[in-house]
Image (cartoon, helix red, strand yellow):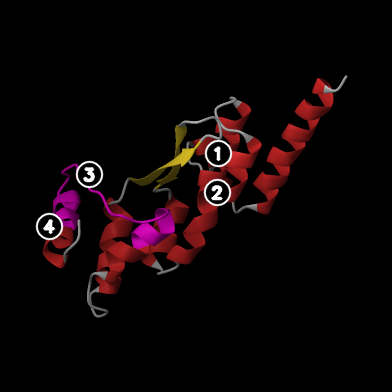
Amino acid sequence: MRDLDTLENAITASETGHLVIGTLHTSDAPNTMNRLLDVFPPSQQPQIRAMTAVSLRGIVCQKRIPDGMGGAVLIYEILLNTMAVSNLISEGKSCQLKSTPAVYHKQGMCTFDQCILEKFQLGLLTRDAALPYMNDPAVISQLNSIWAIAEGKKTR
């Protein structure tokens, strides 16, 4: 979805109960919301935020990254529209959506960093391949701890 008419039609269709699945070329869930809103003139943005806050069900972002073993692995970020997410969207605080998937992990949401950590734990990514794609210091620390424990077991 790249133009105003397409996005208007998609939002209108979703408000009438139709399932709308679209693609936007963005780097993460907050940027997806910003990109969607930025297409509209500033005078329409409050209305579009309110409509999106009600009709959005979720955002899934995905990337392929090198696995460090000669292949690639799919990583993803999932943002579901909870009451908290809906409030952030309607209040124009989409920059705060960045931390939401981390907080609501048990509800099925996840950040790219959490997904990378999971892929690392499953042996699908090497530590060196994972680190350049991670941003959250807490998740990076967790990955490094898991890696250090595994390395320590190898030397015994």
User: What residue does disc 4 label?
Assistant: 9
Disc 2, SS: helix
Question: Disc 1 to disc 3, how far (Cα)?
Answer: 25 Å
Which one is earlier in the sequence, the residue at label 4 or at label 3?
4
Question: Disc 2 to disc 1, how far (Cα)?
Answer: 8 Å
Which contiguous range is marked in magenta? 10-33
Residue in the picture at 60% in, 37% down: 117
Q: Nearer the viewer, residue 129 or 88?
A: 129
Residue 49 appears anywhere in the view = no
Q: Nearer the viewer, mark 3 or mark 2?
A: 2
Which one is earlier in the sequence, the residue at label 2 or at label 1?
1
Q: Is 140 left or right of 24, judged from the image as shown?
A: right
Q: Is 22 left or right of 142, judged from the image as shown?
A: left
- How busy is the neighbourhood of tag 1: few (under 14 within 10 Å), some, or many (20 plus)? many
- How busy is the neighbourhood of tag 4: few (under 14 within 10 Å), some, or many (20 plus)? few
Residue in the picture at 46% in, 33% down: 73
Image quarter of the C terminus: top right
User: What residue does disc 1 label?
Assistant: 116
- How busy is the neighbourhood of tag 3: few (under 14 within 10 Å), some, or many (20 plus)? few
Q: Amino acid at mark 2?
A: Tyr
Residue 51 x %, y %: 26, 61
Q: Is residue 28 magenta?
A: yes
Residue in the picture at 69% in, 49% down: 138
| Label ID, residue 133 | 2
Residue 9 x %, y %: 12, 57
User: What residue does disc 3 label?
Assistant: 21
Which one is earlier in the sequence, the residue at label 4 or at label 1?
4
Q: Amino acid at mark 1?
A: Ile
- How busy is the neighbourhood of tag 2: few (under 14 within 10 Å), some, or many (20 plus)? few
